[in-house]
Image (cartoon, rainbow, N blue to C red):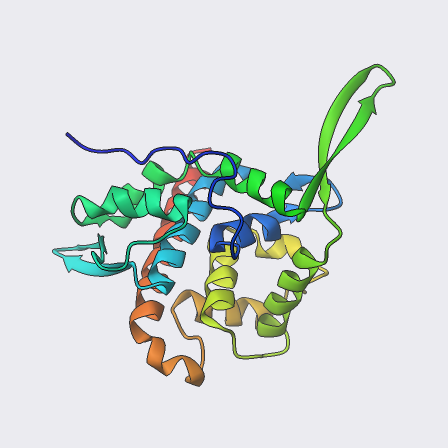
Amino acid sequence: MTRRPHEPSPVAGGSGFPTLPEDLLLLLFQPESGAVRGENTLFYVLAGAVLADLALQGSVVARTRASSIDVEAVRDKTPTDEILLSAWDYVSDGPRGVQTVLPAIGPALRRPLLNRLLARGDLRKEDRKMLALFNTTVLRDGRNGRRAGLVREVRDVLVDGKEPTPRIAALTALIWAGGALHQFDPEIPWNSSVISRARELEQGNWGAGAAGEAVTRTMTAVIVNNVISATAAVSTHR
């Protein structure tokens, strides 16, 4: 019987260092509107961030099988974070194709990740009255500077040519993969040089300092390219 990943509890495991999918969701949040960029394909991108985080920790590796690439759990690298553990458990039964893993783990991610951001104070809820009749709740930036700091780190890589850490490289590549990068303009200018650098990150070309991260770069590139394929397919069928 095929095991499905369980949905993690809303804020469980959220008291430590933020996970990659948390940072990605925070980056995709739009302070001006209170919305999240790319909702139609969000679960693919968040799932890609989970796999990328596992890859950065050495908890999963890529295996080539025939014409596809599978994700395989590394047995002695069990993650402690509940959200990451749920995905790791799903692939621990045996190697699974990335295109199978993304839709399996993605749909359950938004709610617990959002609750973690609220619990940390990265986002906050604000009550509003609509048409002077109806009360509604909107999301607002938590004003703790964490989202602004992440945007600055991504901008440093794409605009100023700074060599990224593996984490920021993966985040930037996933924003590009989900088709949301142009929506950061003017915070991050949308121009040919930014697009060119994003495409380099997509392929795992992070810079000379990342030479020792060959396995991680390859795994992240596999994930990012599968996210691009998945989101492109959704856009085509809309």
What residue is at 47 percent from the left and 45 percent from the top? 13
134 is higher (above) or lower (below) than 9: above
Residue 77 point in image, percent of width and height: 27, 59
Residue 138 point in image, percent of width and height: 72, 32
For residue 157, side relative to residue 177 (left or right): right
Using the rendered view, name the quadrant where residue 218 is placed. Answer: bottom left
Residue extending farthest to the right is 132
For residue 173, side relative to residue 90 (left or right): right
Residue extending farthest to the top is 133
For the residue pair 171 and 117, the one nearer the viewer reads as 117
> Residue 72: in sight, yes or no?
yes
Q: How many marks?
A: 0
What residue is at 18 percent from the left and 59 percent from the top? 63
For residue 10, side relative to residue 92 (left or right): right
135 is higher (above) or lower (below) than 121: above
For the residue pair 53 and 233, the one nearer the viewer reads as 53
What residue is at 67 percent from the left and 44 percent from the top? 123
Residue 48 point in image, percent of width and height: 40, 51
> Residue 38: in sight, yes or no?
no
Q: Quadrant of the N terminus?
A: top left
Residue extending farthest to the bottom is 208
